[in-house]
Amino acid sequence: MKKQHLQKIEDYLWEIPRSYNANMHVPARVYALEGLIDAISSDRSLDQLVNVATLPGIMKASMVMPDAHEGYGFPIGGVAATQYPDGVISPGGIGYDINCGVRLMVSKMRYEDVADRMEDLSKELYKQIPSGVGKGGMIQLNRKAMEDVLIKGAEWAVDKGMGSLEDLEHIENHGCLKEADPATVSDKAKQRGLDQLGTIGAGNHFVEIDVVDQIFHEEAAGAFGLQKGNLAVLIHTGSRGLGHQVATDYIRLMVNAMPKYEYKPPDRELACVPFSSEEGQQYFKAMCAAANFAWCNRQVISWEVCKAWENVFGSYSDCPKLLYDVAHNIAKIEEYTFNGKMEKVIVHRKGATRAFGADFEELPRAFRHIGQPVLIPGSMGTESYVLVGTNKSLELTFGSSCHGAGRRMSRRAAKRQVNAPGLQEQLKKQGIFVTAGSFKGIAEEAPVAYKDVNLVVETVHRAGIALKVAKLKPKAVIKG
Amino acid sequence: MDRTTLLIDFLSELLTLAYTEKAIFCYVHIEKMSETQINAIVSGALVDGFEEDVKAVTYHEANVQKNETGNWETIVIVDI
């Protein structure tokens, strides 16, 4: 689709009207400053956004955030809410990596006091946190323990001494979706997850040591415990092979079940069924279970970070504390106001982060009056952001914001263009230690392959759906 | 179920086996194939690790069709 099909509504908002395609039930909206529109319209993400607007039961608009790029069926950066309970649920609107997400731990340690230890710390983190394709971790679950993880989520790890009860308050949904039912998760999926707790995997997943570089919102930064010059740890990973298998299993089930509901989507990856149907309910319960696995995974990784911290800085050093953990590939039942009336909807976030504002009860007391932390990792070697959600996001974007910088170049193109050993050396000269399983992984995740995270964050800030709190700069990156 | 769904299902099954068995498959001997069923014997080798993390075999752009030479053809995109 070409840029001229977009109608400018605001500096940060564009619309493709319903008249563009007779099958659209709602308009399609793009949250992006003009500087990002060329990149967004250069792939098929806008065509995919139009396809999403044809989903049965979709409410208000199909939307993409400024980090939008082409996905499978749904665009990445997409938000779609469907009517509860008979609108559709689509695994493609959540993604293959269910509850891929980000967590940030903050330390009281100042970077300037330990700058010379960054290389040691990155090596120790690489040792403690298994990474890479199909790599198993130190925890081997049996079938009973797997069921418990799928039901309890992050709490399972805390029960085993990996973290504190306070940590749970600092996780979206307290690290557990209650609707999870392990019986809806296939044996194959469970088997793939048995040795994967505490592992980051490959692709764009990472653990990163950052320094708080700039504060934009003093009050929020204070409530979040972010202080300029202090260290922080950013973790990005999801539900690993277990989640991938759940998505595969249910896309197959839905492709075969769709004729029953007389729905033929424009793309099989948009396979979907009514949420209230038997298949819809099964998928939702399995997705919740996979989401719980992901939260448990990130909780275990935090514990591994603490072990590395202790090994490098000594047993009397305080481990960084969990600030917050957000999911950015997930579906939730949430309530919004339509024509003055509260209604439940099924919100799909695929590469989009929940961004709820102040006075949301689930938030910990320390920042309930401020709003939910929204964590936006930049590309490898560039800055990341901490934002705060707003109540305006509830009005505009079903309480959602962006999730990262957003790819602008395919992995293959990046591999052709980037000299990975050279990039690693160049980053080292800038004081950023990158430890990776392969040069290929470094090339694929090179900053040149991503959009400018500053423009992405500027968009959501100006739109008022999430506000800038702090900028983080990387010092050490561990990846698969 | 059509040919496209069947092929993607078959490849997804192989991907699952690759991860659960920690193996790669180099040879496929198809014993029986219909519109709705593939019976095959696959063989390969156990491996220590994989170079690429393939999350899933997707239906994106997949469309099994006969080309002008009479052979079957499709694009298959995997999520990495």
Image: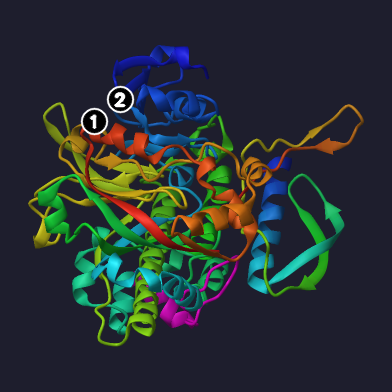
Sort mark 2 into few (<14), some (14-19) or many (20+) by Cα contacts within 10 Å. many
Check the image and name the residue furthest to the right.
Answer: B69
Whether residue A136 is visible to the viewer of this picture, yes or no, is yes
Q: Residue at (55%, 29%) from the top-left corner?
A: A43
Color theme of the render: rainbow
Q: Residue at (53%, 31%) from the top-left corner?
A: A265
The mark found on residue A462 in the picture is 1
The image quadrant where one finds the C terminus of chain A is bottom right
Circle 1: residue type: Arg
Pointer 2 with pointer 1, Cβ within 8 A: yes
Check the image and name the residue furthest to the bottom.
Answer: A315
Q: Residue at (65%, 40%) from the top-left corner?
A: A413
Find residue A35 and report its horizontal and vertical position in percent.
Answer: 40, 25
Q: Locate residue A411 relative to residue A274 in the image: left or right.
A: right
Q: What stretch is highlighted in magenta?
A: A128-151
Q: Is residue A156 magenta?
A: no
The quarter of the displayed image where residue A311 is located: bottom left
* Helix, strand or loop under label 2: loop
Q: Mark 1 lies on which chain?
A: A
Q: Residue at (42%, 28%) from the top-left corner?
A: A36
Q: Which of marks 2 and 1 is nearer the N terminus?
A: 2
Circle 2: residue type: Tyr
Q: Locate residue A390 relative to residue A414 in the image: left or right.
A: left
Whether residue A178 is visible to the viewer of this picture, yes or no, is no
